[in-house]
Image (cartoon, rainbow, N blue to C red):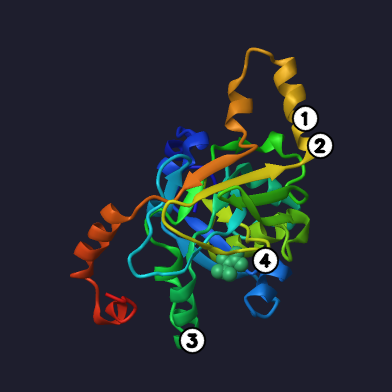
Amino acid sequence: MPESDPEMSARNITRFWEWGRKIICVGRNYADHALELKNAIPKEPVLFLKPPSAYVKEGSPILLPFYTSNLHHEVELGVVVGKGGTAIPQSSAMEHVAGYVLCLDLTARDVQEECKAKGLPWTLAKAFNTSCPISDFIPKEKIPDPGSVNLWLKVNSVLKQQGSTSQMIFSIPYLISYISEIISLEEGDLILTGTPKGVSSVQEHDELQAGIEDIKHFEVCHEVVFLIGALKVPLQAFPQSVSFSIHTANKSKLLYRHKQNHLTPALLLLSPH
Ligand SMILES: O=C([O-])CC(=O)C(=O)O
């Protein structure tokens, strides 16, 4: 695969979700989260995928799939790939990063448990429409040390998740190198790097707020805005805090019910309806 495709390069990386082709997710990358769900601490990264149809931007509703009664939030740092590659060495991995986003890996936990018990893939639990809410793009230079930023998430103003990316079992360079040996990375791909502990259930009409917090980073951010005064956009684009609300799923319920007609019997087993 060529490292840079001229057509792809003409695309705007700050709007990668409109054209990026893959979302590669890393599970159980924080020991405290692996343990809270009684999972073993992995010796190799646990990978799964979401399709680009999982993207939803801040402010738009998250749809609640009809087949779950236990939708969990998982706040994560997302790494946006700026330069593709295969078998990227760890030493040059960060050269392939264009920037970051704050993301949620929404998970239908009950469905995931059922899939785990049956040895089935997690697709229904992890890859449904709107299962990957993302913030605005954060340029790489705004987060000089992505291996040491604090992530937090509140549900209806109650703090649920808080953790530092320094707790990751597998670092960002390691993940880029490991993933790209198996799945070539392309410009516009997103890597979700795992979630710290504190995942919990969300209901219709709940409001989720998440942020990246790092004193040093805020100073850098303010300083940059100060220096380039008129350029307010980068500061606005930086999500000190973003909100997502879970909206009713009346529309989505109908949508999914309609789609239910097309589900295979194996999928229907998972449906309570
Ligand atoms: O569903 C899970 O617990 C696995 C996962 O995505 C994570 O650990 O970030």
Which residue type does callout 2 highlight?
A: Lys
- Note whether ligand 1 is within 8 Å of mark 1: no
Badge 4 vs badge 3, beta-carbon distance below 8 Å:
no
Q: Earlier in the sequence, mark 1 or mark 3?
A: 3
Which residue type does callout 3 highlight?
A: Ala
**210 or 195: nearer the eye?**
210
Q: Marks 2/3: CA distance?
A: 44 Å
Q: Marks 4/3: CA distance?
A: 21 Å
The residue carrying pointer 3 sits among few (fewer than 14), some (14 to 19) or many (20 or more) residues within 10 Å by Cα, namely: few
Location of mark 2 (residue): 216
Q: Marks 1/4: CA distance?
A: 28 Å
Badge 1 vs badge 2, beta-carbon distance below 8 Å:
yes
Q: Marks 4/2: CA distance?
A: 24 Å
From the viewer's perspective, is 125 left or right of 219? Answer: left
Secondary structure beneath label 3: helix
- Which one is in front in this view, the residue at disc 4 or the one at disc 3? 3
Badge 1 vs badge 4, beta-carbon distance below 8 Å:
no
Q: Residue at x 73, y 56 (%)?
A: 163
Q: Earlier in the sequence, mark 4 or mark 3?
A: 4
Location of mark 4 (residue): 29
